[in-house]
Image (cartoon, rainbow, N blue to C red):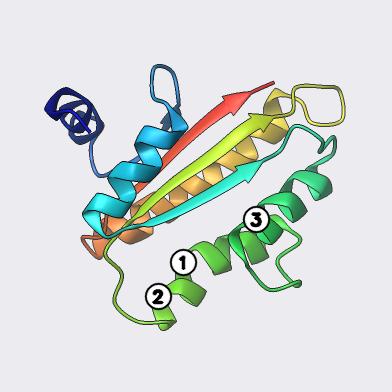
Amino acid sequence: MSEEKMDVLAATGTNVVQSIRAFHIPDLQAEAIKLGQHFLYAYCLEAETRLQVISKIAISFGFPKSARNLDALSDCLTDLIDRAGPQEGFVIVLEQLPSNPKFDKEARETLLDVFRDAAEFWAEKKVPFRVFYSFE
């Protein structure tokens, strides 16, 4: 990976939730590996409803079957992982979040708020937690 790409990731801050924009998923994955951080990826194109999106994320991240609502997802992103032991950091990609009447802008923002809250949780522990997302 070039120094330029590393500098771009470093410029995002360590605890952010932002659009993927110019980042390429393989580059983000490679950077996570290089930094010794977890790379979590969910491809959500086939999901249409809030439940389907949350389920897709939970399954993709290897979370327990109980993580099928926003509160449970939040607990998995914070307390469950924290109890597993010290963490080096996270690079998360939520690709192709739906944009339809069943999963509208409000639903997307509510989901992203869960990730923003998790970013704050990890920031307090001084653990990098970067989330990149895209919409269909």
Disc number for residue 60: 3
Residue on which disc 1 sits: 78
Q: Amino acid at mark 3?
A: Ser
**Residue at the far front in the pictured view:** 1
Dot placed on the residue nearer the N-terminal end, 3 or 1: 3
Dividing the image into 4 quarters, which one contains the C terminus?
top right
Q: Nearer the viewer, mark 2 or mark 3?
A: 3
| SS under mark 1 | helix
User: Residue, x 82% and y 47% (percent of image)?
Assistant: 52
User: Residue, x 50% and y 47% (percent of image)?
Assistant: 115
- Residue 34: percent from the left, percent from the top? 24, 51
Disc number for residue 82: 2
- Residue 7: percent from the left, percent from the top? 15, 29
Q: Amino acid at mark 1?
A: Thr
User: On the rendered structure, is 104 left or right of 31?
Assistant: right
Within 10 Å of the Cα at label 3, are there few (<14), some (14-19), or many (20+) other Cα atoms?
some
User: Residue, x 82% and y 22% (percent of image)?
Assistant: 100
- Decide if residue 26 is in sight here: yes
